Amino acid sequence: MPGRYGGKRVLVTCVDKYMGRPIADAFAAEGAQVIADGDPLLSNEAVDALMARAGEIDIVIANFAEDPFRTRIGQVRDQDWYALFEAMVHPLMRVVRAVAPAWIERKRGKVVAVTSAAPLKGGLPGTSGYCAARGAQNAFVRSVGLELAPHNIQVNAIAQNYIRNERYFPDELIESDVFRQKVLPTIPTGKVADAEETAELALYLASDKCTHMVGQVIPWAGGWVTST
């Protein structure tokens, strides 16, 4: 039997980073035709090329990540600040901008951005650049989500933290004594969730049953953040 995404074409960006692979696998398991792209999309030309090879798209999973460049504000380098926005903020805007005109004409489309809960709480000392870039992603989702809602296009974000992934919470970090002693006690659930939980939320947000949620940044962090 075809899954709930049979006939749907789903673009997953930066598939080999952050949450790309588990989300791509979840959609494929549900029958979607997944365009699993690995380009970081650091230019307009890169996005144009992606759109040309992807063809018609029903759903975009906007998955972008970059190292936090953890540095106190007095030592923040311009190039590191710029790199965070170049890797996470600008590509998100470019992809949504690229798909929006066709979706507005068709009166349907879904964007699920995988962002971060860090700017919702303020993160940790030394992460101001990372929180600024992730916060810009979240603000963009809120604004463009409302702009596109009248066209039956739903744009939302999963603002996650403490989810197992290769970029920020690899197994070796989660299993370390320092993490178990210092970090786990700060998470109300007392655990790091599996990537499949994020993938399942993405499946719902991208589904035809999700029509009334627009421009939302959903805290997904085991209670570490409870509201936006």
Image (cartoon, rainbow, N blue to C red):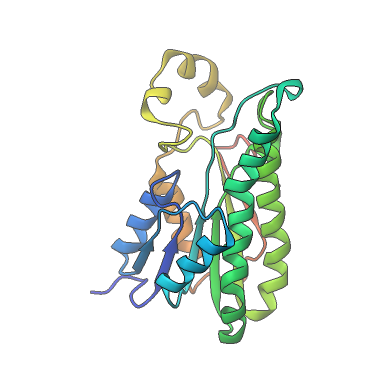
Q: Relative to residue 56, is residue 86 drawn left or right? A: right
Question: Looking at the image, which residue is at 55% across and 79% down?
Answer: 108
From the top left corner, tell me how far across and down residue 23 is, in percent: 40, 54
Q: Nearer the viewer, residue 105 or 183?
A: 105
Question: Looking at the image, which residue is at 71% across and 21% down?
Answer: 75
From the top left corner, tell me how far across and down residue 102 is, in percent: 57, 81
Q: Relative to residue 108, is residue 75 drawn left or right? A: right
Question: Does residue 226 appear in the picture of this structure?
Answer: no
Q: Please, which residue is most extreme toward the bottom here? A: 105
Question: Looking at the image, which residue is at 42% across and 51% down?
Answer: 20
Q: Relative to residue 123, is residue 46 drawn left or right? A: left
Q: Please, which residue is most extreme toward the left here? A: 1
Q: Nearer the viewer, residue 83 or 199?
A: 83
Q: Quadrant of the N terminus?
A: bottom left
From the top left corner, tell me how far across and down residue 208 is, in percent: 49, 74
Q: Relative to residue 133, is residue 24 drawn left or right? A: left
Q: Is residue 10 above or below residue 82?
A: below
From the top left corner, tell me how far across and down residue 124 is, in percent: 66, 26
Q: Is residue 116 above or below residue 137?
A: above
Q: Nearer the viewer, residue 5 or 41?
A: 41
Question: Looking at the image, which residue is at 64% across and 34% down?
Answer: 80
Total count of labels: 0
Question: Does residue 35 appear in the picture of this structure?
Answer: yes
Q: Please, which residue is most extreme toward the right here? A: 74
Q: Is residue 78 above or below residue 106?
A: above
Q: Nearer the viewer, residue 179 or 136?
A: 136
